[in-house]
Amino acid sequence: MNKDRDNRNQPYRSVVLRYGERTLETRSGRRLLDVLLENHVDHRHVCGGNGFCTSCRVEVLQGKEHLSPVSALERERLGREAGRLRLACQTHVHGPVHVRAPRATFGRFSPDGDTSD
Ligand code: FES
């Protein structure tokens, strides 16, 4: 399977993605972290996109229905915040969405809602 797509069998189409104040264009089915990095967005991804560190988390402001379903790994890593927060390395974009880096972007994320430096 192409790593840029999740298991939805949808044809590619153009999608507008907002990251904070920036507006990016991509194709549906792309992994969010790849879209950010290809557009030179300085977004943390400490474990290299392998779902271990949670540093790539984003806050979803609009369009969560246009993202791939929250994975079991995201539920494990993000706990009760899964859905409002997503791991960019585990999330695929299928339609218009607005995300931003969460306020506490540094330090270790705790699924209990705490962060530390
Ligand atoms: S880059 Fe580490 S969890 Fe996404």
Image (spheres, grey):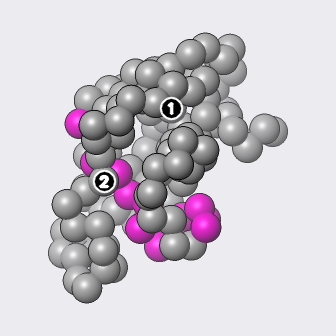
User: Residue at image x 46%, y 30%?
Assistant: 24
Of all residues shown, which one is farthest toward the bottom? 117
Label at residue 101: 2
The reply to whether the magenta stretch includes residue 57 is: yes
Q: Position of residue 32 (x, y in %)?
A: 52, 42
The local secondary structure at tag 2 comes to loop
Residue 66 visible here: no
- Left or right: where does residue 9 sit relative to residue 52? right
Indicate the amino acid at tag 1: Val
Location of the N terminus by quadrant is top right
* Closer to the eye: label 1 or 2: 2
The reply to whether the magenta stretch includes residue 97 is: no
95, above or below 107, in the image: above
102, above or below 107, in the image: above
User: Residue at image x 56%, y 72%?
Assistant: 47
Mark 2 Cα shell of 10 Å, populated few (<14), some (14-19), many (≥20) = some
**Which residues are drawn in magenta?**
48-61
Q: Position of residue 106 (x, y in %)?
A: 30, 74
Q: Position of residue 44 (x, y in %)?
A: 45, 64
Mark 1 Cα shell of 10 Å, populated few (<14), some (14-19), many (≥20) = many
- Of residues 55 and 85, the one drawn nearer to the viewer in this rendering: 55
Q: According to the image, label 1 marks what residue?
A: 93
- Of residues 18 and 80, the one drawn nearer to the viewer in this rendering: 18
Label at residue 67: none
